[in-house]
Image (tube, rainbow, N blue to C red):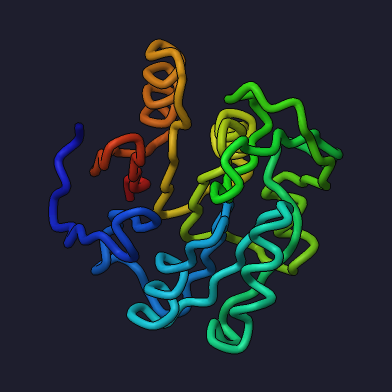
Amino acid sequence: MDAANGLDLKKLGSGYGGWVVPVNRVKSDWICYSGGVGEDTTFDEALINQCGCDVYAFDPTPKAIKYVEREKARLGPRFHFLNCGLWSSETTLRFHVPEDPDNPSFSVLKLTDSEEVIEAPCKSVPQLMKQLGHDRVDLLKIDVEGAEYEVLKSVLRGEVKPQVLCVEYDQPAAFWRMHRCVMDLKRSGYGLVSIDEFNYTFVRRV
């Protein structure tokens, strides 16, 4: 792991849904994209309430949509939600429904024996930036249950250059694939500053 020189690394959000970020780097005018909502917005709320950021959250799955609708008033005007998934292009994907009815995490990977699927719209980060009128994304969180490698293509191609990149490497995943992705990000100018189980935080070198 790379040295976190001068970075004040803190975990924002709950034990389940929180992420380690360099809080002294995050500015109130940052544009934050949060891929994957589920039923835990504590990280997004911390970015809004503690850092003063606007957060744009993306999740096309039924439980996330219902959760955000239910919590909309509490989340406030700086939390913006689009019922769209993250991917490497604009498409409609099949998401596998979790076997456990209490599990909000739908996945493009078949992680259980469940045969039930839903279809949902997905777009790339650059496409969403164009739709929302943004010329940059300062913080990008990717917690998308197996789609992270596709989403990261735009970062590795240099189309998106967030200052802070938070990636969950969903399990099960081959170690070689995770390692190759981490090394590719390092070659693209990112330093790995935190590993919290399978949640990896990268900071772009300046």
Position of 42 with respect to 113 (left or right) is left
Pick whichever, 151 or 82, lies toward us: 82
Image quarter for residue 43? bottom left
Position of 107 with respect to 137 (left or right) is right
Q: Residue at x 36, y 78 (%)?
A: 51
Pick whichever, 131 or 157, lies toward us: 131
Where does residue 106 sit, x and y in percent of width and height? 64, 41
Pick whichever, 105 or 23, lies toward us: 105
Q: Residue at x 80, y 35 (%)?
A: 93
Where does residue 194 sit, x and y in percent of width and height? 24, 43
Image quarter for residue 148? top right
Pick whichever, 4 or 83, lies toward us: 83
Where does residue 78 sit, x and y in percent of width and height? 56, 82
Where does residue 180 sit, x and y in percent of width and height? 42, 17
- State the quadrant of the N terminus: top left
Q: Would you say residue 45 is visible in this rendering?
A: yes
Q: Would you say residue 157 is visible in this rendering?
A: no
Q: Residue at x 38, y 26 (%)?
A: 182
Q: How many marks?
A: 0
Q: Is residue 139 above or below residue 103?
A: below
Q: Residue at x 35, y 68 (%)?
A: 26
Q: Is residue 143 above or below residue 9?
A: above
